[in-house]
Image: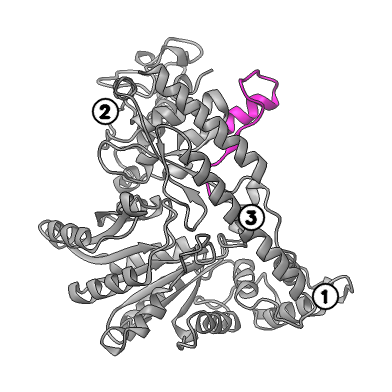
């Protein structure tokens, strides 16, 4: 069964009964127009909602019929549910990923395909791609989860010391107990010390640190705090395009206004202040922009912003009275030799009191990225700077509603910000494993750039940092026309065919945003080196075939 047939959706005009939608008996998906837009969808430019809503609609209509008799009307329907939820999209886990999972099952069942495995290059999940956990991180978290092992001489003494310190700070000395809503105090202290070391001694107050369920939780929490107003006074949130879909999803769910500013693809995806000003000026005609989001290093674009760029952004935020949100989860992932990570907080304070005492900033970090890749632990933190103390009380109240972030994730963050030091029993192994991961990622970033750079019709900026490549691809007019006829974006059509013919799963650029008339896809560089090399070769060969097919 092809993906297009699998993801076929119905175009619905008027329906009196379920029998009007498909013949009696088994549902014949082959009769359904592939990926057509659903009339209920309010975003015809993207196929994700069309797929999910139409599938749900079919299920809903089937459930309403029992022995040919309509059941009582549902309380919760597509029309009565929260419409903001219907509006949100999350491309990274969209229908292509659903189909990739089904293809994996079909391969396991012996169904013949033109490939032997599905290569998931759609998401930045290092361990799912085969990266091994760092020994020390898992030792300490294991000891926190099962303290009986503290008596086991197989564990190095420094791992036991760190685990005991964390457990002593837990209620009942158990990682199964709730923590304070802001997070375990000794871990927040360790985070503050980590930030001070990172930023060359600039002070960090543990009271400004909130331990979160991954960075995503902190980002959504701050956005919630900032949203207010109706009509033209609704909060506008400036986000980079291309962007990580968490931002557009949160903005849609919380009924804020998304204000796009475009990164400069011709200049290594740099942030352009002129573009920021123009975007802000246009947005003020219909909303109240008061938040500026920066992702550095970039996702999906892989760029690392220069210090000068960060200084310009801070001046811009100060002049325009904007709250800054700095997503810095890839701060350890910098590969280009002429690039370096500069935290927004460090640059802010080094610019002097004019800025350091006035510009409001929230910055975010996570255990999921970097050299750790511990996505499943859902650990993260945010630091707030220059927040009104009265508002900070409201922030603490807001996080208290969810009680606390997962304690194992807090423990993992505690180990990451307070790792073994020279002379500790675990230092050599920890440092060796850390460098091996980062060096391998740097090699794969260079390999990705090189192979794409040799491929006609594919333009790829250097992967300066993070763990993704976001190449621009040539798509012939005939393919654009076919995609339009099927209710798809052209890059979605490309990604669907790529998956069905090669088993390679990537995410279309339309899920992240892109300039009109350009087409991209995002892929991670996380697969093992040889598998990534194979992926890149197959992908470039497929693109060449795709272009010829539609030329």
Task: Using the image as rendered, state which of residue 233 and residue 508 is in the foreground.
Answer: 508
Whole-number angstrom distance, CA of label 2 to CA of label 3? 47 Å
Report the disc number at residue 156.
1
Magenta includes 104?
A: yes
Q: Residue at x 73, y 77 (%)?
A: 163
Task: Using the image as rendered, state which of residue 491 and residue 402 is in the foreground.
Answer: 491
The secondary structure type at the circle numbered 2 is loop
The secondary structure type at the circle numbered 3 is helix
Image coloring type: one colour
Q: Residue furthest right?
A: 153
Magenta range is: 101-124
Q: Position of residue 509 (x, y in %)?
A: 38, 41
Q: Residue at x 30, y 18 (%)?
A: 16
**Is residue 70 among what the camera can see?**
yes
From the image, state whether disc 1 or disc 3 is nearer to you: 3
Q: Position of residue 159 (x, y in %)?
A: 76, 76
Upstream in the sequence, badge 2 or badge 1?
2
Upstream in the sequence, badge 2 or badge 3?
2
What is the quadrant of residue 102 in the picture? top right
Q: Residue furthest left?
A: 285
For residue 143, side relative to residue 360 (left or right): right
Could you classify mark 1 by the number of other residues whose Cα lies within 10 Å: few (under 14), some (14-19), or many (20 or more)? some
Report the disc number at residue 440.
3
The secondary structure type at the circle numbered 1 is loop
**Is residue 229 among what the camera can see?**
no
């Amino acid at each position: 069964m092809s993906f297009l047939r699998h993801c076929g959706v119905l175009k619905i005009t008027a329906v009196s009964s379920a029998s009007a939608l498909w013949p009696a008996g088994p549902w014949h998906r082959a009769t359904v127009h592939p990926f057509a837009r659903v009339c209920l969808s309010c975003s015809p430019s993207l196929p994700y909602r069309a797929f999910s809503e139409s599938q749900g609609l079919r299920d809903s209509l089937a459930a309403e019929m029992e022995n040919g008799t309509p059941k009582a009307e549902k309380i919760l329907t597509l029309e009565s549910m929260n419409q903001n939820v219907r509006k949100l999209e999350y491309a990274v886990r969209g229908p292509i990923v659903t189909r990739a999972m089904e293809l994996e099952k079909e391969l396991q069942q012996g169904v013949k395909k033109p490939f032997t495995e599905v290569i998931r290059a759609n998401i930045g999940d290092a361990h799912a791609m085969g990266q091994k956990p760092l020994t020390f991180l898992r030792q300490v978290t294991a000891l926190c989860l099962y303290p009986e092992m503290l008596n086991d001489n197989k564990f190095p003494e420094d791992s036991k010391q760190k685990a005991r310190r964390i457990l002593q700070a837990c209620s009942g000395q158990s990682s199964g107990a709730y923590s304070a809503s802001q997070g375990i105090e000794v871990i927040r202290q360790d985070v503050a010390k980590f930030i001070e070391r990172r930023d060359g001694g600039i002070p960090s107050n543990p009271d400004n640190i909130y331990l979160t369920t991954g960075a995503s939780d902190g980002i959504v929490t701050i956005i919630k705090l900032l949203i207010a107003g109706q009509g033209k006074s609704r909060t506008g949130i400036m986000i980079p395009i291309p962007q990580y879909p968490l931002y557009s999803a949160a903005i849609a769910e919380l009924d804020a206004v998304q204000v796009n500013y475009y990164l400069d693809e011709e200049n290594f995806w740099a942030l352009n202040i002129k573009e920021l000003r123009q975007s802000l000026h246009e947005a003020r005609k219909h909303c109240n922009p008061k938040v500026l989001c920066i992702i550095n290093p970039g996702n999906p674009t892989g760029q690392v912003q220069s210090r000068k760029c960060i200084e310009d952004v801070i001046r811009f935020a100060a002049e325009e009275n904007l709250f800054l949100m700095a997503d810095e989860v890839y701060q350890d992932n910098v590969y280009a030799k002429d690039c370096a990570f500069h935290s927004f907080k460090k640059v802010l304070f080094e610019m002097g009191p004019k800025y350091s005492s006035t510009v409001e900033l929230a910055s975010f970090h996570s255990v999921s990225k970097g050299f750790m890749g511990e996505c499943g632990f859902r650990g993260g933190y945010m630091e707030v700077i220059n927040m009104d103390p009265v508002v900070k009380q409201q922030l603490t109240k807001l996080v208290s509603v969810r009680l606390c972030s997962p304690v194992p994730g807090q423990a993992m963050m505690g180990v990451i910000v307070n790792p073994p030091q020279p002379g500790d029993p675990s230092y050599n192994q920890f440092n060796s494993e850390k460098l091996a991961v980062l060096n391998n990622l740097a090699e794969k970033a260079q390999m990705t750039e090189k192979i794409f750079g040799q491929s006609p019709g594919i333009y790829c900026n250097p992967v300066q940092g993070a763990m993704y490549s976001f190449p621009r691809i040539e798509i012939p007019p005939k393919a654009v026309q076919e995609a339009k006829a099927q209710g798809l974006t052209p890059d979605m059509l490309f990604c669907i065919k790529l998956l069905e013919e090669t088993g390679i799963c990537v995410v279309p650029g339309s899920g992240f945003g892109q300039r009109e008339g350009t087409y991209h896809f995002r892929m991670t560089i996380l697969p093992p080196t040889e598998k990534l090399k194979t992926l890149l070769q197959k992908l470039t060969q497929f693109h060449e075939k795709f272009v010829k097919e539609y030329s």
